[in-house]
Amino acid sequence: MKEIIFSVIVYLFIFLVSALLVYFGLKTYKKRKKIVGVLLITLGILIPSILSGIRYDVGSDYSTYVGMFENAVSSKPLYYRSIEPASAMVIKLSASMRSSVFMFSCFSLITNLCFFIAFVRLFKGEAKKTTLAYMFFLCIIYPTTLNAVRSGAAISLATLALSFLLERWSAKTITAAAALIIIAFLFHKSIAIMLLFLPAFWLMQKNIKKNAFVKKSVLLAIYLLVAAFLPPLYAIVKEVIPLGDYSRYIEGVGSSFSIPLASFAMMIPIVYAGIFVHYNKSEYGDEMKKALSCSLFYIPLSIATGWLSYVKGLSRITFIFDPIIVILMVYLISLCKNTSKFWKITTIVCISGVVGAMFIRNLIWSKDLPYKTVFQQEVSYATKD
């Protein structure tokens, strides 16, 4: 137990140091001391990346990635099935350097950097909001990336793509977002699920003057109905559309239904934001509207994955919406400063409770505890039989 408590403290300390470096880096950069600012930000992003790199037997999929690394070292196929090309490239490059530390650090660096850039874009480089989003990311999403390594990189690239789409839909932003989604797909194909929500992201970010509420409500209702009746719909779709490798995840859909408590926890900020907006109509702007509207689609996705609960770990698909909820929580914290004491207290209690609960839950769920380093263990790169 002492080892686990110490590990939690280590994570929190690293996250705090990383966030502070990012904050002071952004502040320094704005004061036109760009080189110093970039150095501080780089260090802030590198620290959790190194934490990921030097771990040993931390994360459910740790042994899987070490196995792929060792197979690459001995020129064997990486895995029993094909690995996405971008991820395979990182693994093989690391194998050529004989460094699994580099492999894990590289995946983590891509993930952390893309999330940071996405937050900078979404919050226009504002130091407080960007840092708060980055800290929420470290507490909620980062622990899962020690398990879902390739998925973490893919989701970070998808979040960066979303930062373009939430800005405005133009030839330039669509091209940039499309390129990023393609690259994300090359890290992990599960990110293709995001394509199903592009119509929602498009409609939710538009300032539609006529019947806006009705149009958005109808679209959300369609997604909810599809999620609720996924089993019979799948029976029809599989006869028409070839699903290839994806079929192994959804074959047998509907045999059970279960939504993890973590999904309900992540719905709390969405529900709270809806109540906040209802009672504080004059206190929120377009950014808050977009974040709240888009985050609502976390609910049908959670219902859909509920039908797939028989597939271990498939609930991680909902991770693609975790960054949107992080963004929503940052807007809530920012807006509550201009409201009454009641809304300030309830907002802080709600968000800190969710962040704290998800931090502990994801550390446990991803098997990130206790934290151990390669310096504490003798790592073998022997060829696997």
Image (tube, grey):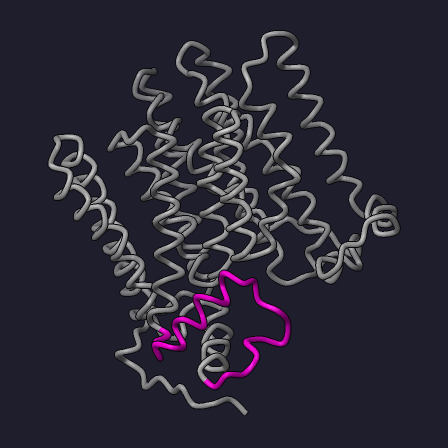
Residue in view at x 64 percent, y 30 percent: 199
Residue 109 in view of the camera: yes
- Residue 170: percent from left, percent from top: 52, 25
Instruction: Find out whether residue 99 is within the magenta segment.
Output: yes
Residue in view at x 50 percent, y 60 percent: 86
Locate the C terminus by quadrant: bottom right
Q: Quadrant of residue 54?
A: bottom left
Residue 1 in view of the camera: no
Locate the N terminus by quadrant: bottom left
Identity of the residue furthest to the top in this view: 210
Part of the protein shown in magenta:
74-100
- Residue 288: percent from left, percent from top: 45, 23
- Residue 51: percent from left, percent from top: 29, 63
Residue in the foreground of this view, choosing between 58 and 238: 238
Instruction: Find out whether residue 221 is within the magenta segment.
Output: no
- Residue 293: percent from left, percent from top: 55, 26
Question: Is 311 positioned to the left or the right of 272 in the image?
Answer: right
Residue in view at x 23 percent, y 50 percent: 42
Residue in the foreground of this view, choosing between 160 and 361: 160
Q: Is residue 298 above or below residue 361?
A: above
Q: Quadrant of residue 361?
A: bottom left
Question: Is 253 positioned to the left or the right of 10 in the image?
Answer: right
Question: Is 273 positioned to the left or the right of 49 in the image?
Answer: right
Q: Give the mark count.
A: 0
Q: Is residue 165 above or below residue 104?
A: above
